[in-house]
Image (spheres, grey):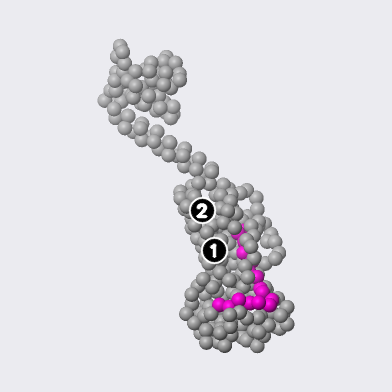
């Protein structure tokens, strides 16, 4: 039994006439009658009473009609689903991001706009450190990731870079430097700094270290924080000062003041990383949405 047999059957059932059904389907009446006969033979039951001027459903035909309509409706849903998937308008998108990237306005705007534009796509977010995100992307456990890359290219990956983001100082509010509207990086030479390891963001640690050396000093390391959030907790506990991406200032942590740096300004890099090679429609749509959010 093929879908065309079911469509032929429905046309005759709705028209109650083989000739009109044939005209509607764009085929001849004899071939239509032959196709219906083949269907009845396969089912082992007559579907129509042939009348001089039309056709009526038999009891078997009425029973078959209910299921036939369901089959055609299901086939139509399948067709639409396949076409949506081919256009990247449906399916599953697994998207990874670092904790610091989650607060970047371009990242949140991209995800929000993508969800609005493609409501049939299920978006699953994974928040992990950079090294873990890279591992999962390469193992095809994630479709794309927002990460803090270094300056070098990452083998096998394509980086869609966002504008560089200036970094700011997160200072305990009780610290004298918190009273100033801005600070210099050189002014932190004698201050204990809370740093973040490369696993958090490939660029953050090296960028801060490089900027400090350009300002004429090697930083005094107070703590190495495993996450941005834990680093802010250490700042609030007055264990040191942290240099963080500007977008982190959106996190209103009690006891912390964020201050602009005016001399040597470290920058935080951000990019959407995808695997090189075949680019599914879902990813093309995500990249297009990202470009529109820049």
SS of the residue at dot 1?
helix
Where residue 114 is drawn, which disc sits there? 2
Residue at 56% from the left image edge and 49% from the top image edge: 285
Precedes in sequence: disc 1 or disc 2: 1
Q: Quadrant of the C terminus?
A: bottom right
Q: Which residue is mark 1?
A: 105
Give the label, 1 or 2, closer to the camera.
Answer: 1
Q: In the rendered view, tell whether residue 1 sits above or below residue 285.
A: above
Residue at 50% from the left image edge and 40% from the top image edge: 83
Q: Is residue 70 left or right of residue 263?
A: left
Where residue 268 is drawn, which disc sits there? none
The answer to which image quadrant residue 216 occupies is bottom right
Q: Which residue range is magenta in the image?
A: 258-273
Residue nearest the observer in this picture, 3 or 94: 94
The verdict on residue 36 being magenta is no
SS of the residue at dot 2?
helix
Residue at 61% from the left image edge and 86% from the top image edge: 192
Q: Is residue 76 left or right of residue 65?
A: right
């Amino acid at each position: 039994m093929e879908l065309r047999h079911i469509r032929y059957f429905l046309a005759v059932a709705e028209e109650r006439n083989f000739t009109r059904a044939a005209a509607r389907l764009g085929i001849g009446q004899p071939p239509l009658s032959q196709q219906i006969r083949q269907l009845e033979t396969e089912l082992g039951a007559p579907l129509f009473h042939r009348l001089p001027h039309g056709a009526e459903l038999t009891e078997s035909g009425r029973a078959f009609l209910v299921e036939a309509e369901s089959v055609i409706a299901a086939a139509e849903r399948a067709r639409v689903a396949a076409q949506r998937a081919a256009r990247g308008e449906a399916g599953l998108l697994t998207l990874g991001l670092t904790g610091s990237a989650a607060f970047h306005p371009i990242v949140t705007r991209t995800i929000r706009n993508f969800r609005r534009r493609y409501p049939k796509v299920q978006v699953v977010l994974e928040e992990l450190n950079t090294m873990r995100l890279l591992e999962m992307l390469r193992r095809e456990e994630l479709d794309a990731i927002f990460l803090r890359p270094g300056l070098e290219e990452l083998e096998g990956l394509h980086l869609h870079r966002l504008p560089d983001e200036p970094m700011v100082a997160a200072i305990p509010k009780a610290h004298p430097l918190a009273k100033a509207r801005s600070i210099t990086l050189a002014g932190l030479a004698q201050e204990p700094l809370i740093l973040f390891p490369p696993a958090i963001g490939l660029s953050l640690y090296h960028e801060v270290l490089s900027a400090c050396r350009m300002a004429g000093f090697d930083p005094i390391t107070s703590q190495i924080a495993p996450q941005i959030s834990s680093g802010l907790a250490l700042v609030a506990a007055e264990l040191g000062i942290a240099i963080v991406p500007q977008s982190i200032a959106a996190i209103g942590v009690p006891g912390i003041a964020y201050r602009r740096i005016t001399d040597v300004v470290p920058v935080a890099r951000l990019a959407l990383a995808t695997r090189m090679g075949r680019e599914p429609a879902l990813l093309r749509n995500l990249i297009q949405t990202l470009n529109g959010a820049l």
